[in-house]
Amino acid sequence: MTTGLWIILDHLVALLSIAAWFAAGVALALRRTRLATAVLVAAVLVTLVRVGTVAMLAGRGWWFVQEKVLLGLPMLGAAAAGAVLVAGPRMLAARRGHDDGWSVGGLVSVFTAAYAALAGLVVTFLVGYPLTLSTALIAISLVCAAALLTMRVVAPAAEEAADAGVARAPEGRRAVSRRRFIGWTGGAVVVTAAGAGTGLAFLPTRSVTVGGGPGRSSRAAVSVADLRGSGSPAPGGTVRRHVLTAKKATVRLASGRDIEAWTYNGEVPGPAITAIQGDLIEVRLRNDDIDGGVTLHWHGYDVPCGEDGVPGLTQMAVEPGDEFVYRFRADQVGTYWYHTHHASHIGVHKGLYGTLVVTPRHGQRADGHAAVEQLELTLPVHTFDGSVVIAGSDGRTEHPAPPGTPVRLRLINTDSDPHRIVLAGTPFQVAAVDGRDLNQPGEVSDVGLRLPAGGRYDLKFRMPNTPVALVVDDDHDGGLRLHGGVPGDGRVKDTSALPELDLLGYGAPDAAPFDTRDADRHFTLVLDRGLAMVNGRPAYGQTVNGRGHPSIPDQLVAEGDIVRFAIVNRSLETHPWHLHGHPVLILSRDETPSTGSPLWMDTFDVRPGETWEVAFQATNPGIWMNHCHNLPHAEQGMMLRLRYDGVTTPFGGAHGESQGHGH
Ligand code: C2O
Ligand code: CU
């Protein structure tokens, strides 16, 4: 069973235990002693089962259970034991017919167990990892406060009963004064603890984590504004100039449907930018009418930091009427894309994106055309108003491809959710992932590929005599059909049951360019949902180590460091993790090492319950965003910065204005 399923199962058992303890309390309050006894036994059993599910989860990683083991279960265990000891004997006596089994203490203790069970689950949902003293104090005081309140409600009823039953009146009075004492002192303790817990939550936190490496040095500062791209192409290269103007436009899709889009140059996707390795790319970005501003971020392309297009960090957003010129050498070949990085959960979604493809210089003839006549299609996949649009066309696209033609399909997921890709009708290779070639990728067929948000796959095959279909999300009406000349014959078998290709075992291993075993820094990012400050406001956000942007500490690295990340997903959603400026080498997923080709990715899907270990070498100085590429998640707080020692930014405070994907 996957960790994700264990998380869900544990939530269900937790819910069941809450229900059982409350039911026991209610049955007891109604003086249904037999029923109450049975339910109490059930509650104890469910609580024991809960210990089991938490133990199973603990086997998957401490991150998944820390708050359960340190707070939730001890709190519930203590309250449950109290309930059994206080309520149990009276209830057993009642079964033997001595009295009705009801007592103030019994009732309060059973309800306290219910409150403890509830508090445990609430802490898991609202706070999660890491548990803080503040959270523990607040949770415990809330449970105690609820217990005291219950006593206040129940006790008067008990007093009436005691007054009515003359024989037991003196005992009742002693009990009353004892309860008053508990009420007052308990109340005072609870208020103090809750106050202390709340106060602790407002203590300032550190603004940087060092991952086990040295802290900030006093080396001379470099500004990101000075980390700009080269002014000239490599020998033999040319300058590729573009002007991209961001503007609102009505765009007609292939089906004739119109969409109200935000565009570069009135097109969706924006103009395709291509280059041959070594060329200089120079893009002048203008903004006509996109209020709030736009930028260009070169997703997956390791440009110098000053060209990275992050507003408030590497530049200011380009407001209507303004412009910004990006310049960088196209030294890296492969399939990439560009998109705005300002309020990108809105901007990219509405169409502010385009493709960037760089081809190798060798294999080019003098006239700049590829030596082998091959069919290359760049296919950004984007969803507009619920329908999938591939390279600007919705519905099905037909494309001629003479048999024998070498074909390369460059797939780009520009959405915030993963897409499932099936190539039917031919064996093929996944030649490249996120722009980087794989080592000896084997031929596969009848497999599904999961393309993470922001990710790219290059699929390579030789066109057969029969049609080939590219199916996205198992939708057989849409997608792309390649045919030898006669369109229309593109029926495909059901693809939804095809197994998913695991890239961690695909291709042949090769030596890594650096030794990942003794990393200089090791950071752990635990992803979850929870209460956090997000962009200066309290929110139920998407969190990293319990915090939201921009209050997540920056990760500090020094140039040359080997850096390892462990990314842990405690939540029930997928988080496509994306680091700017560096591809990361995938080391393992759920402790199973990557055994295929070295796998370099810039965006990888961390699914619910998964733990990924990745590594990279810090060779591109700057301050880089490190975030979830489900862009609404980034906006809801799941975004932080990786900062090189000695690099500063003039475009925003260290923890100043909303950066990156924010408004
Ligand atoms: Cu493609 Cu910071 O993003
Ligand atoms: Cu996410």
Image (cartoon, rainbow, N blue to C red):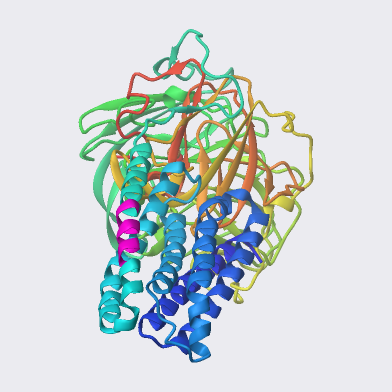
Asked if residue 301 is positioned above or below residue 412 in the image, the reply reads above
Asked if residue 234 is positioned above or below residue 342 in the image, the reply reads above
Residue furthest bottom in the image? 97
Residue 424 vs residue 26, the one in the foreground:
26
**Residue at the location (28% across, 58% down)?**
259
Task: State the image coordinates of residue 106 (x, y, percent, origin top left).
Answer: 43, 73
Residue 333 vs residue 131, the one in the foreground:
131
Asked if residue 180 is positioned above or below residue 476 in the image, the reply reads above
**In the image, is 83 to the left or to the right of 322?**
right
Q: Main secondary structure of the magenta part?
A: helix
Residue 544 vs residue 167, the one in the foreground:
167
Q: Which residues are magenta?
A: 176-185
**Residue at the location (45% across, 44% down)?**
546
Say which quadrant the C terminus sits in.
top left
Say which quadrant the N terminus sits in.
bottom right
Task: State the image coordinates of residue 424 (x, y, percent, origin top left).
Answer: 63, 67
Task: State the image coordinates of residue 527 (x, y, percent, origin top left).
Answer: 50, 48
**In the image, is 309 to the left or to the right of 299?**
left
Q: Is residue 477 visible?
A: no
Task: State the image coordinates of residue 629 (x, y, percent, origin top left).
Answer: 46, 46
Tell which quarter ligand 1 is in.
Answer: top left
Q: Is residue 462 visible?
A: yes
Q: How many marks?
A: 0
**Residue at the location (44% across, 83% down)?**
101
Residue 343 vs residue 295, the one in the foreground:
343
**In the image, is 519 to the left or to the right of 103?**
right
Residue 179 is a magenta residue: yes
Residue 81 is a magenta residue: no
